[in-house]
Amino acid sequence: MIETRAEIEVTAALAAAWAVVWDVARYPEFLSDVIAVNVTPGPAPLEVEAGFEMRVFRTRSFRLRLHGEPPDRLRWTLVDGQHLRANEGEWALKTTAPGRVLMAYRLALDTSVPVPDAIARRLIEFNLPTALRQFKARIETRNATTAALPPVANGVQDHG
């Protein structure tokens, strides 16, 4: 079993960070390892199933059930996947100061085939930090764009 935790702080409001984390269908736009995501509604509100195609040494496919707990938590569990027995984790978001959010990521992954230590280390020491930096960039870029939009009379902004 591979287990890891990581954190990153972003300059954004909690709602802005949550919006990026929950918008799973857009992950391929900014996460370099994610090739495609197919999202379908789940059986409950704020629950979806997402089929991922990812490049992790080679292309892998798996399906997760994601449960949103806005504005500060996203949890997931494995539905099915190539060479996986378990994939569960969460994003936990916490405001640390006005306009600052600590994003904590937790993952527990169990494969049906042995994973060499070198591959597990690469996932934890390279791929995960890269993904966290990509989330940070996406959130802060979107936050800066939103902050730059002029307010409108009814308080609603058109984000195009």
Image: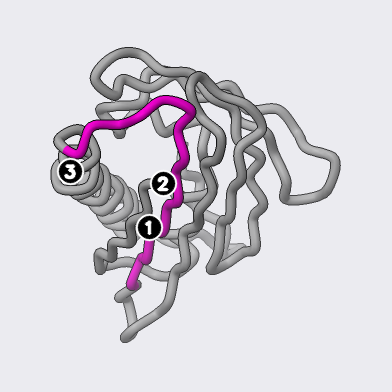
Q: Which mark is residue 150?
A: 1
Q: Which residues are magenta?
A: 102-117
The nearer-to-camera label among 3 and 2 is 2
User: 75 and 82: which one is in front?
Assistant: 82
- Tell me, yes or no, whether the highlighted magenta stretch contains residue 115: yes
> What amino acid type should be assigned to the residue bearing mark 2?
Met
| Mark 3 / mark 2, whichever is N-terminal | 2
> What amino acid type should be assigned to the residue bearing mark 3?
Arg
In the rendering, at what x and y percent does residue 8 appear? 25, 64
Which residue is most to the bottom? Answer: 97
User: 75 and 12: which one is in front?
Assistant: 75
What's the distance in space between the residues labelled 3 and 2, CA to CA? Answer: 13 Å
Q: Which residue is mark 3?
A: 121
At 52% across and 42% down in the image, what residue appears?
87
At 31% across and 86% down in the image, what residue appears?
97
What's the distance in space between the residues labelled 1 and 2, CA to CA? Answer: 49 Å
Which residue is most to the top? Answer: 59
Q: Secondary structure at mark 3?
A: helix
- Name which quarter of the figure residue 17 lies in: bottom left
**As displayed, is residue 109 above or below residue 62?**
below
Mark 1 residue crowding within 10 angstroms, few (<14) / some (14–19) / many (20+): few
